Amino acid sequence: MERLIGVDIGGTKTRVGAVWNGKILTRRDFPTRGLAEICAVIREVLHEVGWEKPDAIGIGAPALVDMHQGRILCAPNLPPYWNGMSVVDELKNVFACPAYLGNDANLAALGELVYGWQATDFLYVTWSTGIGAGIVAAGRVIWGVNGQAGEIGHLPLQPDGPQCNCGKYGCLEALAGGAALCARARERLGQALSAKELVERARQGEPGSLALIEEACTAMGQGLAIAAELLDPEMIIIGGGFTASWDFLGPKVMAVLARFSHAHPKVELAKLGDNVGVLGAAALPFHFPFR
Protein backbone atom coordinates (compact mmCIF):
# COMPACT_ATOMS: atom_id res chain seq x y z
CA MET A 1 0.00 0.00 0.00
CA GLU A 2 1.52 3.25 -1.14
CA ARG A 3 -1.33 5.48 -2.35
CA LEU A 4 -2.98 6.38 0.91
CA ILE A 5 -5.73 8.80 1.85
CA GLY A 6 -5.71 10.17 5.40
CA VAL A 7 -8.91 11.76 6.73
CA ASP A 8 -8.80 13.77 9.96
CA ILE A 9 -12.33 14.68 11.04
CA GLY A 10 -12.36 17.45 13.64
CA GLY A 11 -15.08 19.10 15.65
CA THR A 12 -14.99 22.16 13.40
CA LYS A 13 -12.59 21.35 10.54
CA THR A 14 -11.84 18.25 8.47
CA ARG A 15 -8.56 17.59 6.67
CA VAL A 16 -8.08 15.18 3.77
CA GLY A 17 -4.62 14.37 2.46
CA ALA A 18 -3.01 12.16 -0.17
CA VAL A 19 0.01 10.48 1.43
CA TRP A 20 2.87 8.74 -0.39
CA ASN A 21 5.75 7.18 1.55
CA GLY A 22 4.94 9.23 4.65
CA LYS A 23 4.74 12.53 2.75
CA ILE A 24 1.58 14.56 2.21
CA LEU A 25 1.36 15.31 -1.51
CA THR A 26 -1.68 17.53 -1.16
CA ARG A 27 -4.15 18.43 1.59
CA ARG A 28 -7.57 20.01 1.68
CA ASP A 29 -9.10 21.67 4.77
CA PHE A 30 -12.82 22.40 5.00
CA PRO A 31 -15.57 22.80 7.62
CA THR A 32 -16.79 19.53 9.09
CA ARG A 33 -20.23 18.61 7.79
CA GLY A 34 -21.09 15.14 6.50
CA LEU A 35 -19.56 12.05 4.92
CA ALA A 36 -20.80 12.95 1.43
CA GLU A 37 -18.66 16.09 1.46
CA ILE A 38 -15.64 14.09 2.66
CA CYS A 39 -16.11 11.67 -0.24
CA ALA A 40 -16.31 14.58 -2.68
CA VAL A 41 -13.06 16.06 -1.35
CA ILE A 42 -11.34 12.67 -1.51
CA ARG A 43 -12.28 12.53 -5.21
CA GLU A 44 -10.82 16.00 -5.73
CA VAL A 45 -7.59 15.01 -3.98
CA LEU A 46 -7.31 11.81 -6.03
CA HIS A 47 -7.78 13.80 -9.25
CA GLU A 48 -5.17 16.35 -8.18
CA VAL A 49 -2.47 13.73 -7.57
CA GLY A 50 -3.46 11.60 -10.57
CA TRP A 51 -4.56 8.47 -8.70
CA GLU A 52 -7.46 6.45 -10.09
CA LYS A 53 -8.18 5.08 -6.59
CA PRO A 54 -6.37 4.82 -3.26
CA ASP A 55 -4.82 1.62 -1.95
CA ALA A 56 -6.41 2.32 1.43
CA ILE A 57 -8.16 5.03 3.44
CA GLY A 58 -7.58 5.78 7.11
CA ILE A 59 -10.08 7.90 9.03
CA GLY A 60 -9.74 9.55 12.42
CA ALA A 61 -12.88 10.80 14.17
CA PRO A 62 -13.33 12.73 17.43
CA ALA A 63 -15.53 10.01 18.80
CA LEU A 64 -15.95 6.78 20.65
CA VAL A 65 -15.57 4.24 17.86
CA ASP A 66 -15.94 0.52 17.30
CA MET A 67 -12.82 -0.28 15.32
CA HIS A 68 -14.00 -3.85 14.73
CA GLN A 69 -17.12 -2.66 12.90
CA GLY A 70 -15.71 0.60 11.55
CA ARG A 71 -18.54 2.50 13.16
CA ILE A 72 -18.84 5.72 15.16
CA LEU A 73 -20.60 5.02 18.45
CA CYS A 74 -20.82 8.46 20.01
CA ALA A 75 -19.39 11.73 18.69
CA PRO A 76 -20.06 14.43 21.33
CA ASN A 77 -18.64 17.26 19.22
CA LEU A 78 -20.19 16.29 15.88
CA PRO A 79 -23.82 16.64 14.71
CA PRO A 80 -26.07 13.79 15.92
CA TYR A 81 -26.32 12.10 12.51
CA TRP A 82 -22.71 10.92 12.90
CA ASN A 83 -23.68 8.72 15.86
CA GLY A 84 -23.95 5.10 14.76
CA MET A 85 -22.59 5.83 11.26
CA SER A 86 -20.82 2.90 9.57
CA VAL A 87 -18.05 5.05 8.13
CA VAL A 88 -15.85 2.20 6.91
CA ASP A 89 -18.64 0.44 4.97
CA GLU A 90 -19.63 3.71 3.30
CA LEU A 91 -16.08 4.49 2.16
CA LYS A 92 -15.43 0.91 1.02
CA ASN A 93 -18.54 1.05 -1.15
CA VAL A 94 -17.63 4.40 -2.69
CA PHE A 95 -13.91 3.85 -3.33
CA ALA A 96 -13.63 0.04 -3.59
CA CYS A 97 -10.61 -0.13 -1.31
CA PRO A 98 -9.90 -1.07 2.33
CA ALA A 99 -10.85 1.56 4.89
CA TYR A 100 -10.00 1.79 8.59
CA LEU A 101 -11.49 3.94 11.36
CA GLY A 102 -9.93 5.04 14.65
CA ASN A 103 -10.27 7.69 17.32
CA ASP A 104 -8.56 10.88 16.15
CA ALA A 105 -6.31 11.29 19.20
CA ASN A 106 -5.14 7.68 19.00
CA LEU A 107 -4.29 8.21 15.34
CA ALA A 108 -2.43 11.41 16.14
CA ALA A 109 -0.40 9.42 18.65
CA LEU A 110 0.29 6.89 15.90
CA GLY A 111 1.38 9.72 13.60
CA GLU A 112 3.86 11.02 16.16
CA LEU A 113 5.11 7.47 16.81
CA VAL A 114 5.74 6.71 13.13
CA TYR A 115 6.64 10.10 11.65
CA GLY A 116 7.09 12.63 14.46
CA TRP A 117 8.86 12.42 17.82
CA GLN A 118 9.19 8.62 17.50
CA ALA A 119 9.49 8.22 21.28
CA THR A 120 8.61 4.80 22.68
CA ASP A 121 6.60 5.80 25.79
CA PHE A 122 4.43 8.89 25.56
CA LEU A 123 1.00 10.37 25.93
CA TYR A 124 -0.36 12.41 23.04
CA VAL A 125 -3.04 14.94 24.05
CA THR A 126 -5.09 16.97 21.61
CA TRP A 127 -6.57 20.19 23.00
CA SER A 128 -8.99 21.75 20.57
CA THR A 129 -12.78 21.76 20.18
CA GLY A 130 -12.66 18.67 22.37
CA ILE A 131 -9.91 16.95 24.36
CA GLY A 132 -8.57 13.48 23.64
CA ALA A 133 -5.45 11.43 24.09
CA GLY A 134 -3.53 8.51 22.69
CA ILE A 135 -1.18 6.29 24.67
CA VAL A 136 2.05 4.80 23.32
CA ALA A 137 3.91 2.25 25.47
CA ALA A 138 6.97 0.23 24.47
CA GLY A 139 6.70 1.61 20.96
CA ARG A 140 3.07 0.57 20.39
CA VAL A 141 -0.24 2.41 20.51
CA ILE A 142 -2.48 1.15 23.30
CA TRP A 143 -5.85 0.82 21.60
CA GLY A 144 -7.98 -0.88 24.25
CA VAL A 145 -10.50 -3.64 23.58
CA ASN A 146 -12.53 -1.64 21.05
CA GLY A 147 -10.10 1.15 20.18
CA GLN A 148 -11.32 3.59 22.82
CA ALA A 149 -8.28 3.80 25.11
CA GLY A 150 -6.96 7.21 26.09
CA GLU A 151 -10.22 9.16 26.56
CA ILE A 152 -8.63 11.71 28.89
CA GLY A 153 -11.21 14.31 27.91
CA HIS A 154 -13.91 12.33 29.66
CA LEU A 155 -12.16 11.91 32.98
CA PRO A 156 -14.68 13.30 35.52
CA LEU A 157 -12.69 15.91 37.43
CA GLN A 158 -15.66 17.69 39.02
CA PRO A 159 -18.66 15.38 39.56
CA ASP A 160 -20.83 18.44 40.29
CA GLY A 161 -19.36 20.42 37.37
CA PRO A 162 -20.93 21.40 34.04
CA GLN A 163 -22.49 18.73 31.87
CA CYS A 164 -20.30 17.41 29.08
CA ASN A 165 -21.59 16.69 25.57
CA CYS A 166 -20.96 13.01 26.36
CA GLY A 167 -23.71 13.18 29.00
CA LYS A 168 -21.55 12.99 32.11
CA TYR A 169 -20.76 15.89 34.44
CA GLY A 170 -17.49 17.64 35.16
CA CYS A 171 -15.39 15.98 32.45
CA LEU A 172 -12.06 17.56 31.56
CA GLU A 173 -13.52 18.38 28.14
CA ALA A 174 -16.48 20.18 29.77
CA LEU A 175 -14.02 22.30 31.77
CA ALA A 176 -11.33 23.02 29.17
CA GLY A 177 -12.47 22.00 25.67
CA GLY A 178 -12.90 24.78 23.13
CA ALA A 179 -16.62 24.20 22.55
CA ALA A 180 -17.31 24.09 26.27
CA LEU A 181 -15.30 27.27 26.88
CA CYS A 182 -17.32 29.11 24.23
CA ALA A 183 -20.55 27.97 25.89
CA ARG A 184 -19.34 29.06 29.32
CA ALA A 185 -18.28 32.45 27.92
CA ARG A 186 -21.81 32.99 26.65
CA GLU A 187 -23.23 32.09 30.07
CA ARG A 188 -20.79 34.12 32.19
CA LEU A 189 -19.81 36.99 29.95
CA GLY A 190 -22.92 37.27 27.84
CA GLN A 191 -20.87 37.26 24.64
CA ALA A 192 -20.41 34.86 21.76
CA LEU A 193 -16.63 34.44 21.65
CA SER A 194 -14.52 31.91 19.82
CA ALA A 195 -11.92 30.04 21.85
CA LYS A 196 -9.22 32.04 20.07
CA GLU A 197 -10.90 35.32 21.00
CA LEU A 198 -11.31 34.16 24.58
CA VAL A 199 -7.61 33.35 24.87
CA GLU A 200 -6.61 36.70 23.36
CA ARG A 201 -8.86 38.61 25.75
CA ALA A 202 -7.35 36.64 28.65
CA ARG A 203 -3.87 37.44 27.38
CA GLN A 204 -4.78 41.12 27.50
CA GLY A 205 -5.93 40.75 31.11
CA GLU A 206 -9.72 40.97 30.68
CA PRO A 207 -10.89 39.58 34.06
CA GLY A 208 -13.83 37.39 32.97
CA SER A 209 -11.94 35.78 30.10
CA LEU A 210 -8.84 35.33 32.22
CA ALA A 211 -10.85 33.55 34.92
CA LEU A 212 -12.25 31.08 32.39
CA ILE A 213 -8.84 30.41 30.88
CA GLU A 214 -7.24 29.97 34.31
CA GLU A 215 -9.92 27.41 35.19
CA ALA A 216 -9.37 25.59 31.91
CA CYS A 217 -5.60 25.46 32.40
CA THR A 218 -6.05 24.17 35.95
CA ALA A 219 -8.33 21.40 34.70
CA MET A 220 -5.91 20.51 31.89
CA GLY A 221 -3.00 20.39 34.33
CA GLN A 222 -4.99 18.11 36.64
CA GLY A 223 -5.91 15.81 33.76
CA LEU A 224 -2.29 15.58 32.64
CA ALA A 225 -1.19 14.92 36.23
CA ILE A 226 -3.61 12.00 36.55
CA ALA A 227 -2.35 10.54 33.28
CA ALA A 228 1.30 11.08 34.26
CA GLU A 229 0.79 9.34 37.60
CA LEU A 230 -0.95 6.42 35.91
CA LEU A 231 1.38 5.97 32.93
CA ASP A 232 4.77 7.46 33.93
CA PRO A 233 5.43 8.46 30.29
CA GLU A 234 8.72 9.64 28.86
CA MET A 235 6.91 12.51 27.14
CA ILE A 236 3.59 14.26 26.94
CA ILE A 237 3.02 15.61 23.43
CA ILE A 238 0.42 18.36 23.05
CA GLY A 239 -1.39 19.02 19.79
CA GLY A 240 -4.55 20.79 18.67
CA GLY A 241 -5.66 24.36 18.15
CA PHE A 242 -4.78 25.61 21.64
CA THR A 243 -1.09 24.96 20.99
CA ALA A 244 -1.07 28.19 18.92
CA SER A 245 -1.27 29.97 22.31
CA TRP A 246 1.00 27.59 24.23
CA ASP A 247 3.38 30.42 25.15
CA PHE A 248 0.54 31.86 27.25
CA LEU A 249 -1.32 28.69 28.27
CA GLY A 250 1.62 26.31 28.69
CA PRO A 251 3.16 27.81 31.84
CA LYS A 252 -0.24 27.77 33.56
CA VAL A 253 -0.83 24.13 32.65
CA MET A 254 2.72 23.08 33.56
CA ALA A 255 2.51 24.69 36.99
CA VAL A 256 -0.56 22.61 37.84
CA LEU A 257 0.97 19.45 36.38
CA ALA A 258 4.06 19.92 38.55
CA ARG A 259 1.93 20.52 41.63
CA PHE A 260 -0.18 17.39 41.28
CA SER A 261 2.21 14.79 39.84
CA HIS A 262 5.39 13.13 41.08
CA ALA A 263 6.19 12.11 37.51
CA HIS A 264 8.22 14.61 35.52
CA PRO A 265 7.74 13.84 31.81
CA LYS A 266 9.02 16.17 29.14
CA VAL A 267 6.19 18.18 27.62
CA GLU A 268 6.55 19.03 23.94
CA LEU A 269 4.33 20.30 21.16
CA ALA A 270 3.44 17.92 18.33
CA LYS A 271 6.33 17.73 15.90
CA LEU A 272 3.94 17.13 12.99
CA GLY A 273 1.82 20.21 13.75
CA ASP A 274 -1.62 20.15 12.15
CA ASN A 275 -0.53 17.36 9.76
CA VAL A 276 -0.50 14.91 12.67
CA GLY A 277 -4.07 13.68 12.17
CA VAL A 278 -3.76 13.12 8.42
CA LEU A 279 -0.45 11.29 8.73
CA GLY A 280 -1.71 9.21 11.65
CA ALA A 281 -4.83 8.25 9.69
CA ALA A 282 -2.70 7.32 6.66
CA ALA A 283 -0.52 5.11 8.89
CA LEU A 284 -3.54 3.24 10.34
CA PRO A 285 -3.81 0.66 7.50
CA PHE A 286 -0.29 -0.55 8.42
CA HIS A 287 -0.95 -0.59 12.17
CA PHE A 288 -4.60 -1.61 12.44
CA PRO A 289 -4.87 -3.78 15.57
CA PHE A 290 -8.04 -5.77 14.81
CA ARG A 291 -7.63 -7.83 11.66
Image (cartoon, grey):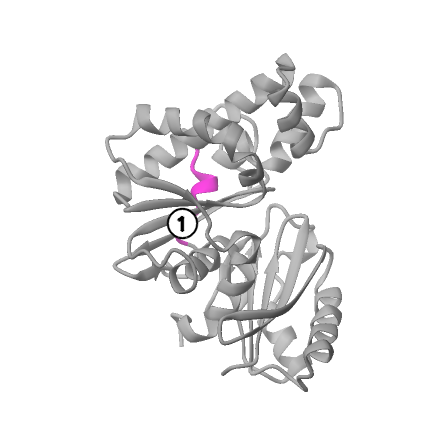
Relative to residue 76, is residue 115 drawn left or right?
left
User: How busy is the neighbourhood of tag 1: few (under 14 within 10 Å), some, or many (20 plus)?
Assistant: many
The answer to which image quadrant residue 119 occupies is bottom left
Q: Residue at x 34, y 33 (%)?
A: 225
Where's residue 151, x and y in %? 44, 47
Taking depth in this image into account, of 133 and 256 the one nearest to the observer is 256
- Residue at 32 percent across and 62 percent down: it is 140
- Image quarter (top left, top right, bottom left or bottom right) of the C terminus: bottom left
Q: Which residues are magenta?
A: 149-156
Q: Which residue is mark 1?
A: 150
- Find numbered disc 1 in the image and state the secondary structure of the residue it sits on: loop
The amino acid type, in three-letter code, at marker 1 is: Gly
User: Residue 274: where, in percent of width, then height?
Assistant: 57, 53
Tally of marks:
1
Left or right for 150, reference 42: left
State the image coordinates of residue 41 (x, y, percent, origin top left). 73, 69
